[in-house]
Image (cartoon, helix red, strand yellow):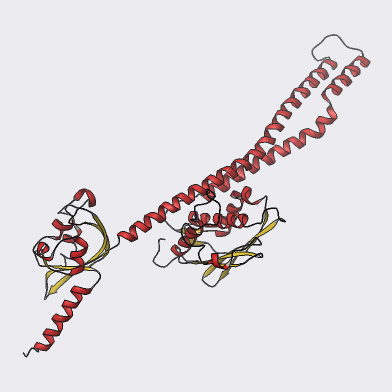
Amino acid sequence: MFVNNTDITAAEAFRAAVMDHMADGLYTTDNEGRVNSVNRAATEMLGWSENELMGRLPHDVVHNAPARNGHSAQDCPLALSGADGEQAGDCEDRYVRKDGSVLEVAHSVSPLHVGASVAGTVVVFRDITELKQRQCRQMQGSHDQKLEALGRLSAGLAHEINTPIQFVGDNTRFLAEAGRAMLELLLVYRECMGVDSEDQLPWEERKRRAREAEAKADIEYLAEEVPSAVEQSLEGIDRVASLVRAMKAFSYKDTKEHSYADLNEGIRTTVIVARNEVKYVADVVLDLGELPDVLCNLSDLNQVFLNLLVNAADAMPEGGKRGEIKLTTRVEGPMVVLSFADNGTGIPEEIRKTIFDPFFTTKEVGKGTGQGLALARAVCEKHGGTIEVNSEVGLGTEFVLTLPISGKRGGSA
């Protein structure tokens, strides 16, 4: 068979160009699992020279500090992957550089087939340290934002619960005094009826004593106020119970798993929970359409609803007329559309471009972390959806969330 030397030279040149210029690290191993070629990017990322890597087991190089990655030689993924002729996809791992520092990587392992046997493997890896650090910052930002929200909610809920508890307490004390007065009146009636005495009082004396006891008890006042106090107390207990139920529903199932949930109920719950943040500055109008249950993480979405509702309340001008916040939901094809609109101060165009950036905030120091809208966008994107803003200075702002009913493709279910 004739072999064209020009083809061989071109193939070698192509291989050399790939090995020298590709951004990802790449090395190959022989059938004993030892490195027999390595590219420039791999040596730069790992800190070892080509000569230092040749002929060595990858595990001895990149997993030489087991305490930092937890791999032993027996369960090393680099040794196990590809050995059975199967390709290992994008897997995350921790490599240790020559200087001992840790490199977060995503790698894939592909077997090299020669006929029916496996002659070695090709390992390609890339540095995801910055990505992991960004994810860590996002998680910390989410934690900080939830703590901020929790602080505001706790103060608001304390106020909301304190009001009914106060009048329930006042009514209970009033009912206790009314009960004593009614009991004293009842004892006088018993005496007048001669239940506990063999002596029979003259009828006029009985009437006199009964009238005095009724005047002392103020029977007309009690007859009017006792039923009202009982009704108010029951209403107060119902208000506290509804707040507790709303708070439980608001924070329900704080997991990474997605399940089908009623977004309209999530919005109603959020409005109850955030009532103290809103009630002094705006009226909330609900225009909730008929929605199917949506595959989502309702706890994360509740946080988004809360951020948007509180932001809308904060956008109301100080000292101005009472505002309005309108929450609308509807179905558009395979998506649900949620709108949070207010008639507040609006967002200037130059700020509108950066409101979704992490740590950006127009609030005073100590009033916000600047994570609310950034996390709202992250949550929407995690669900395979979007969030957009429409605003005009002096007229108000609308945030529009679009979410797939069946959840993000390939996402958690």
In which quadrant of the rendered view does residue 131 lie?
Answer: bottom left
Q: Position of residue 226 (x, y in %)?
A: 77, 33
Q: Position of residue 283 (x, y in %)?
A: 68, 55
Q: Is residue 110 visible?
A: no
Q: Position of residue 121 (x, y in %)?
A: 15, 68
Residue positioned most to the right: 204
Quadrant occupied by the N terminus? bottom left
- Give above or below for 103 relative to 224: below
Residue drawn at point x = 65 percent, y = 42 percent? 238
Q: Residue at x 13, y 56 (%)?
A: 60
On the question of residue 227 being in view, the answer is yes
Residue 129's spot in the image, x, y percent? 30, 59
Does residue 91 appear left or right of residue 359 in this picture?
A: left
Q: Residue furthest left?
A: 1
Task: Name the residue: 18% across, 65% down.
Answer: 43
Q: Is residue 324 left or right of residue 112?
A: right
Residue 307 versus residue 385 in the image, above or below: above
Front residue of this view, candidates 206 and 99: 99
